[in-house]
Image: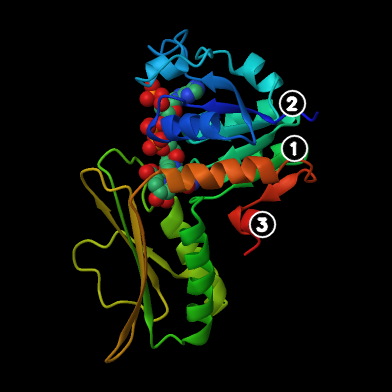
């Protein structure tokens, strides 16, 4: 009988880490073989089920990422850029699929992920939900159909703990809009307006961020023309949508060639 892929979760105590741990424990397609937290974290050494406030599951949280990942077929990583870059090297050495949900990665981080993807499968997306990935495709289509008489604005809202802006999802949507228009996002993006900004530049793609309370994640793409507006919206109400996508990516990645992939590849969109 074939054994199920063994999965390691990085940042197991985090908002997404708990959701992912729960999702893999519930799955009949994968085995949870490791839960990693940083050295000194109060969960290290504890049974992960008990640490989450439930029954024991017989797996202790570890701070030894090297040993955990060496045994893994996939690593699911929703943490922070520095952790993700270090994890990519370990996943590449183990030839394990690295599923990356972490946002706020810089150009240098992305270069290091590209290097890791020469040896292993890396699936990365700023949003792993089916709904947002469908919205990405719709955004590209609508942007391609309209000219610059329609101003494009991306508005995102998240919980008060989020540390990066614009969100990874907002950047995915902005990128799709730019591709639809046939322009480079870096040439037209307009972030963080404040003060006497002057009139809106024709063809700009604007970004605005709201932070508050426990908002899971909300994204609007607005196409504002003279006398009419088109609104494309996604509202996430449960982080389980991201965890489901990440587990799907970890399973899809088994047997793929080394390289960089995203959720459009996984979902076949
Ligand atoms: N792509 C997608 O679909 C989604 C992406 N995200 C992204 O995922 C990331 C995490 O979000 P969220 O869960 O809300 O954040 P949290 O801060 O709740 O979780 C991050 C976790 O990583 C832990 N961590 C820090 N350093 C290490 C280390 N060296 N080894 C192992 N674990 C470590 C943190 O521990 P400690 O708290 O002690 O520092 C924390 O438990 C963000 O970038 C967010 O934008 C979120 C949702 C969906
Ligand atoms: O930090 C979050 O919470 C989320 N981050 C991702 C992003 O930056 O877009 C995805 C989701 O919106 C939740």
Residue drawn at point x = 64 percent, y = 40 percent: 250
> Residue 3: where, in percent of width, then height?
75, 28
Vertical side of 162 occupied by 17: above or below: above
Residue identifier under label 3: 265
**Image quadrant, ligand 1:** top left
Q: Decide: few, some or many residues near mark 3? Use Cα within 10 Å; few <14, some 14-19, many ≥20.
A: few
Above or below residue 141? Residue 115 is: above
Quarter of the N terminus within the rendering: top right
The dot on residue 94 is: 2
Whether residue 6 is visible here, answered yes or no, is: yes
- The part of the image, by quadrant, that contains residue 263 is bottom right
In front: 57, or 207?
57
Using the image, tell me which numbered label, if any, was put on residue 120. Answer: 1
Residue 127 position within the rendered picture, expressed as x and y whole percent measured from the top left: 48, 51
Query: Image check: 1 left or right of 209?
Result: right
- Which numbered tag is attached to residue 134? none
Q: Residue at x 57, y 77 (%)?
A: 182
> Which marked residue is nearer to the observer: mark 3 or mark 2?
3
Left or right of residue 46: residue 247 = right
Residue sitting nearer the eye, 183 or 21: 21
Question: Where's residue 225, x and y in %?
Answer: 33, 87
Residue 254 at x, y = what percent? 74, 40
Residue displayed at 50% across by 16% down: 57
Disc 3 to disc 2, C-alpha distance: 23 Å
Q: Secondary structure at mark 3?
A: helix
Q: Earlier in the sequence, mark 3 or mark 2?
A: 2
Quarter occupied by residue 84: top right
């Amino acid at each position: 009988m074939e054994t199920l892929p063994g999965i390691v979760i990085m940042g197991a105590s985090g908002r997404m880490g708990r959701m992912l741990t729960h999702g893999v424990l519930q799955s009949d397609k994968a085995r949870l073989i490791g839960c990693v937290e940083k050295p000194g974290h109060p969960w290290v050494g504890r049974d992960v089920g008990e640490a989450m406030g439930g029954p024991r599951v017989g797996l202790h949280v570890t701070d030894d990422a090297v040993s955990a990942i060496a045994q893994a077929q996939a690593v699911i990583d929703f943490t922070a850029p520095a952790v993700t870059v270090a994890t990519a090297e370990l996943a590449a050495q183990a030839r394990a699929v690295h599923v990356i949900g972490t946002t706020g990665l810089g150009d240098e981080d992305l270069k290091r992920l590209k290097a890791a993807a020469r040896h292993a499968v890396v699936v990365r997306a700023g949003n792993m939900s089916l709904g947002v990935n469908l919205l990405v495709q719709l955004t590209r289509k609508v942007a391609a159909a309209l000219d610059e008489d329609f101003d494009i604005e991306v508005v995102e809202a998240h919980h008060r703990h989020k540390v990066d802006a614009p969100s990874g999802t907002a950047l995915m949507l902005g990128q799709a809009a730019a591709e639809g228009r046939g322009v480079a996002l870096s040439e037209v993006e307009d972030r963080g307006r404040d003060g006497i900004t002057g009139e809106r530049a024709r063809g700009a793609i604007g970004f605005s961020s709201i932070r508050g309370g426990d908002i899971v994640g909300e994204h609007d793409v607005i196409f504002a023309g003279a006398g009419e507006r088109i609104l494309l919206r996604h509202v996430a109400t449960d982080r389980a949508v991201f965890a489901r996508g990440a587990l799907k990516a970890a399973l899809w990645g088994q047997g793929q060639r080394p390289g960089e992939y995203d959720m459009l590849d996984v979902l076949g969109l």
